[in-house]
Image (cartoon, coloured by chain):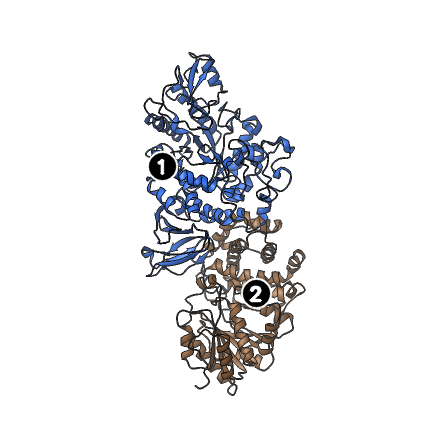
Chain colours: A blue, B brown
Amino acid sequence: MPNDWYKDAIFYEVHVKAFSDADGNGVGDFAGLTQRLDYLRDLGVDCLWILPMYPSPLRDDGYDIADFYGIHPGYGTVRDFQNFLDAAHARGLRVIADLVMNHTSDQHPWFQSSRAEPTGAYGDHYVWSPTDRRYEDARIIFMDTEKSNWTHDPVRHEYYWHRFFSHQPDLNYDNPAVRKAMLDVMRFWLDRGLDGFRCDAVPYLIEREGTICENLPETHTILKEFRRVIDREYGGDRVLLAEANQWPEDVRPYFGDGDEFHMAFHFPLMPRIYMSIRREERLPLVDIYTHTPPIPPTCQWCIFLRNHDELTLEMVTSEERDYMYYAYAQDPQAKLNLGIRRRLAPLMDNDRRRIELLNCLLFTLPGSPVIYYGDEIGMGDNIYLGDRDGVRTPMQWTRDRNAGFSTADEGRLYLPVIADPVYGYQAVNVEAQTKQPTSLLNTMKRLIAVRKRSRAFGRGTIEFLHPVNPSVLAFIREHGDDTILVVANLSGRSQPVSLDLARYRGAVPMELLGGTRFPPVGEQPYFLSLGPHGFYWFRLEPRDRRPQRYGIEDAAI
Amino acid sequence: MTDVAIQADPVASVATVDADVQRLGSRPIVLALLTYNNVATVPAVAQTGYRGLSRSFPDVPLAIVNADAGSSDGTTERLAALGLPATLTRHESPLIELTAVPFHGVPGRGVALRLALQTTRRLGARAIVLLEADVTSVTDEWLERLARPVWEDKADLVLPAYARHRYDGTITNLLLAPLVRALYGRRLRQPLAGALAMSGRLAEHLLLHPGWRWTGRDLADLWVIGTAIADGFAVWEAWLGPRRVESRTRTTDLPTMVAQTLGGVFALMDRHADLWRQVRGSEPVPAIGTTTTPRTEPIDIDVDRLVGAFRLGMRDLAGIWEHILAPETLGDILSLDVGDAARFRFPDELWARAVYDFALGHHYSVVHREHLLRSLVPLYLGRTAAFVVATREADAAATEAALEAVGAAFERQKPYLVERW
């Protein structure tokens, strides 16, 4: 297997607790997830991204880790995890797992020791201060719930630093023992065969006075060291994915010279995709690429439409944020922090054409796409659940009790299944969509299968075309001699478009989704018409390219 | 000529067709041409067709009926300029077929066929000969052999049988012909040969028949054949010699051809189960002309690539095949030994069951139908490889016997299909 497999891979983000409950206790587990691996293989994804699976008080849905070396009892055991990992590998699926590097739960033994024994072995594992007046330039991320990045500890009688919730104290990466401890954690899971980590909240590892305490050079030094050790000890095919909710130019250093993270999320792209579709113009989307710097050839962006968090609007301007709220979150309940806590289908008013168009963009723009579990069937959300739980409800497998997710009594489920008339499991479930050839699920399988036919989608350059019609997005992806033209109508009405394809004169556009050959590109601008939110994926085949032949084509009928 | 009825605007309205019919009067034999961007070939085909019919039936008034799918290359103008007695009409076609022309070369062929038959009926035609406008090997003898059995009331439908190389027509020989044989009980060599001759009474019967769906993408030819057989009309074949196509538009993309032809058959099976469910056994059809055995000179077929494509299908499409094929069929297919392409075998009975499973999968829509049809392609390529391997050293008679065995297997397995339908 090539070491840069992640460049062509399609990722699937899944909550263990939300996917499938094998033991009937109302919470999904690794045994249940293992049983569903065939479904994921058939969907066509390549790599599963497992949200935090470690023992945790679950005050932040597992991002508050209380033991890096275990599996949350509700999800199973390390043995269950190993069985799952082996079964995934047997199906050709890779697995990466969330790892929260920046902080732990306040229940973690390291923190308990640190607060109880300031001079003990763990006394310096966290960032302590006698005053809460340090690092005042650092912003507060969870501004809905936290008033300060410092919280006073009544045991140690000092303040501890936390960039997120107050129950998540930040680790002190200036302490070599912390860095070694975290590397040992990584080794533990990589030794079991894990294919990599999605590293949570990496910009915040180091604090320095007079800075915003994000993206500091010392942080990069630490991350590069981690990468070097992992490459050296594991042969270079394990992947590190950075979660750095920053502008692309600020994320760029996390790739280093190809010696830091293999991948990083492209956060600002996602809200601009939504904005482009709502405004029915390509400008917001194209514009973000003018702010996206080149990355080393071995690196890759990770792109997504939705994830387990709110639709984050940190990376839009205030004016844009207001527009997005107006457009997508008219119900105030849907707003959370600086985002919108909705799933993909409700954000699109369950408009199938818009959902498909969004996925079209996900699968064709530069980067490796991440599908959030349930979005492949158009699951809905429940914005009346607390925090971000509204988008973390049980996977909807069938129309049976508890959506086929669990045999537990309904009241024991970790969260109620979606049961509203539009998105309820009776209407939206895997079983029904598997049987319906035109379902969203089957359409997703088709899009994924077609994407896999060209490496240009994962590895190609991108060049935007500039047709007069602002509602039409058109771009070329090129990799080697493979040239892909994507044309998408961002508008809800049919649109004509003339494309300047002079460079490709004589090429024959082969529409990949339907396998249809279009008229060759000629002297004139290439004219196309697109239905509402319609799109084409063309491979531009040189006219004189003779396909490899079997010798039976000319008179097969 | 005084009786040439040509419109300056080749798009015929009802009024202009009325005027054409009025002007032409009774035309007992009609040459029908379905065209789409055939400017390079249509003059020769029309002239040969007209000349051939004139020679065979010297005292019978003839006319050409053209149904055009919207040519942009001057096809209809060239046809009009020939000065032959003709009426030119234009029909609507699905946009998708105009941009990606189907294997038969005529976007909206079903609509075109109906339009042509309607016009010939109004001309009082007793015999209609339909030629493909891009098949340039047409000769006077073709017209004689196609039209004669109809004119003499021996046949109502005459289909061509061309002289071909044994590895020509692998879709026809390994899929279409065996299927049509099992479905309709007639051993037709080339059910989708394009050209045909038809009696006026069969045309009338078809035009009045409530079963003909008039959507442009249907393969109406197969329904025509099935209905003619089922309703007791005489179906013949005519041996015509080699067929040469000079087309710039027809698809030669193998998966597309498989999808279009099989899709047509499966759609027909779906809508007209009445035509085939009760049929058992099969019989040859009467033929005119000299039977020719397939040519056997060596040609370059890449068996390794064919088997490689099948192997790739086994690897990548097993997940889709699981939904389509019965478990035992899938098991047998996955057990085929693909290690050595030169010894690759694909038993006829297994092939027949697989194709029937696909027909059933199409009927019950177990997966997206386009996926279903496309996922059959590697199986077809594998079966083709096995056919080439099995016959490469064989003579023409042995090759014919191998094809006969395929047809017989489809017949034997038909109860499997009917029981599950």
| Residue toward you, A284 or B29 | A284
Looking at the image, do the residues carrying marks 1 and 2 touch, with CB atoms under 8 Å apart? Answer: no
At which x and y percent is residue A338? 44, 33
Disc 1 designates what residue?
A: A248
Chain of the residue where label 2 is placed in the rendered structure: B
Chain of the residue where label 1 is placed in the rendered structure: A
| Residue toward you, B198 or A339 | A339
Disc 2 designates what residue?
A: B177
Residue under the point 62% across and 42% down: A399
Task: Indicate the quadrant where residue B183 lies.
Answer: bottom right
At which x and y percent is residue B84? 44, 82
Residue B393 visible, this angle: yes
- Determine the secondary structure under disc 2: helix
Q: Quadrant of the N terminus of chain A?
A: top left
Residue B43 visible, this angle: no
Compared with B306, A16 (above or below) is: above
